[in-house]
Image: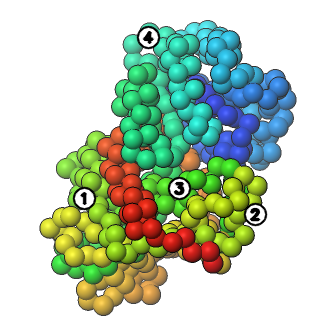
């Protein structure tokens, strides 16, 4: 069965030869193809600097989509070799898009996915605008949309600057800011559980909740991402994005209606009320972090942080919120823990398994979850034009306000970086 939004669509992936496409996007597209959840007329155009042609690119990408039922998707891929800072490269890309439209005999929707390091966002955005890629045709009802991975800036000021640059070319309803945790089914289950479970109803507040813990602990270290990670650290990498959104979904008011704008406004409102407890700050770096390629010798980047926060809201007055994330922690624990005033505990577990526990009793277990389920949701929702599980500009602004307060407190209080 084909999706309701079945208009011809072209997905353009900038940085298509990188890890994100090979490990996440390609596999997600393969699964959507297998499930017949892509439009009947659908193409993927890869854009990168490697000297490839379409045939070689298809051969290279085949292992990522390799199964008897999905090999047909390879025929939907084409490749344009080019440089992100070269205008002629964007002209070649525009010509490829026009060729696809001409073959179909109609204008197609265009989705631009920036699967590149954040440092390249400004350059690509400027060239998309100057090359008129965002205006490939004027047929009524056709749209262009842009998908952008986190991080959205490195602080509130840089996030606002990036936002202003994006909005020179795209309107807010065309911008799909990705935080893949929002697209995880388990996080959606958190909200569904709290609003539908008979134990709580409207009393999901300080009347029933004592404390909330949100943690993302990883067993692995930074690995080969030293150049990217150093100078960013655990707080900016995980706290400002995933952990903030996990908390927002856990504590936000029920949206006024089922519209995307209502859900995003509810999350933004919570994030705007989030205040750190600057008396409870801890940061740490694992012992061999500085030996990683790309990391400066005396790096002060934290690979683990823990902080406490509260919500400036009558509904959550006095409820303690603990947030922590780190790499090379000896175990993987990704979860939301809600301590109730009746002495019981709710555990929403994302990894090592997807499950919900009520005081140790397993209520829900998702067996063999699909590894690319979140990216399937990201792609299908963008095609359908549903922004519910994408981050709004207000959410970005409010989460950075909170994060910047912690960083300023670290500096002002000279919180030591513990080497474990």
* Disc on the earlier residue, 2 or 4: 4
Q: Residue 145 carries which label?
A: none
Q: Which residue is the site of mark 1?
A: 273
> Residue at 53% across / 55% down in the picture?
237
Q: In which quarter of the image is residue 271?
A: bottom left
Mark 3 crowdedness (10 Å alpha carbons): few <14, some 14-19, many ≥20: some
* Disc on the earlier residue, 2 or 1: 1
> Residue at 28% across / 42% down in the picture?
261
Per the model, the C-alpha gap separating discs 1 and 4 is 43 Å
Mark 2 crowdedness (10 Å alpha carbons): few <14, some 14-19, many ≥20: few
Q: Which residue is the site of mark 2?
A: 291
Per the model, the C-alpha gap separating discs 1 and 3 is 21 Å
* Disc on the earlier residue, 2 or 3: 3
Give the secondary structure at mark 2: helix
Answer yes or no: is residue 388 visible. Answer: no
Report the colour scheme.
Answer: rainbow
Per the model, the C-alpha gap separating discs 3 and 4 is 40 Å
Which one is in front in this view, the residue at disc 1 or the one at disc 4?
1
Which one is in front in this view, the residue at disc 3 or the one at disc 4?
3
> Residue at 19% across / 72% down in the picture?
317
Report the side of 366 relative to 28 (left or right). left
* Disc on the earlier residue, 3 or 4: 4
Question: How many numbered discs, if any?
Answer: 4
Q: Which mark is residue 237?
A: 3
């Amino acid at each position: 069965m084909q999706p309701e939004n079945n208009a011809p669509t072209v997905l353009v992936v900038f940085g298509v030869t990188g890890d994100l496409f090979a490990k996440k996007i390609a596999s997600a597209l393969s699964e959507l193809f297998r499930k017949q959840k892509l439009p009947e007329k659908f193409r993927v155009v890869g854009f990168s600097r490697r000297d490839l042609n379409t045939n070689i690119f298809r051969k290279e990408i085949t292992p990522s989509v390799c199964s008897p039922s999905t090999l047909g998707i390879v025929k939907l891929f084409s490749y344009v070799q080019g440089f992100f800072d070269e205008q002629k490269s964007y002209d070649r890309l525009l010509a490829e898009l026009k060729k696809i439209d001409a073959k179909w005999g109609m204008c197609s929707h265009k989705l631009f996915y920036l699967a590149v390091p954040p440092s390249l966002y400004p350059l690509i955005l400027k060239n998309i605008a100057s090359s008129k890629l965002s205006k490939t045709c004027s047929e009524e009802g056709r749209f262009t949309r842009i998908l952008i991975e986190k991080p959205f800036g490195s602080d509130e000021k840089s996030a606002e600057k990036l936002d202003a640059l994006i909005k020179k070319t795209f309107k807010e309803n065309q911008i799909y800011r990705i935080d893949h945790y929002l697209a995880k089914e388990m996080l959606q289950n958190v909200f569904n559980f709290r609003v539908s479970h008979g134990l709580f109803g409207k009393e999901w507040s300080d009347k029933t909740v004592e404390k909330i813990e949100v943690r993302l602990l990883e067993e692995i270290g930074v690995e080969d991402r030293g150049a990217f990670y150093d100078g960013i650290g655990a707080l900016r990498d995980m706290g400002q994005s995933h952990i903030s959104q996990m908390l927002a979904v856990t504590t936000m008011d029920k949206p006024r209606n089922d519209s995307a704008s209502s859900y995003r406004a509810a999350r933004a409102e919570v994030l705007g009320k989030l205040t750190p407890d600057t008396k409870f700050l801890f940061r740490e770096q694992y012992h061999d972090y500085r030996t990683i390629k790309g990391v400066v010798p005396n790096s002060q980047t934290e690979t683990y942080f823990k902080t406490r926060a509260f919500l400036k809201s009558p509904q959550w007055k006095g409820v303690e919120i603990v947030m922590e994330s780190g790499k090379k922690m000896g175990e993987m624990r990704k979860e939301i823990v809600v301590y109730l005033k009746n002495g019981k505990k709710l555990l929403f577990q994302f990894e090592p398994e997807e499950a919900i526990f009520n005081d140790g009793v397993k209520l829900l277990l998702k067996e063999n979850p699909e590894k690319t389920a979140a990216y399937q949701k990201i792609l299908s929702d963008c095609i359908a034009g549903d922004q519910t599980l994408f981050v709004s500009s207000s959410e970005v602004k409010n989460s950075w306000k909170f994060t910047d307060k912690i960083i300023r407190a670290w500096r002002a209080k000279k919180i030591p970086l513990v080497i474990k």
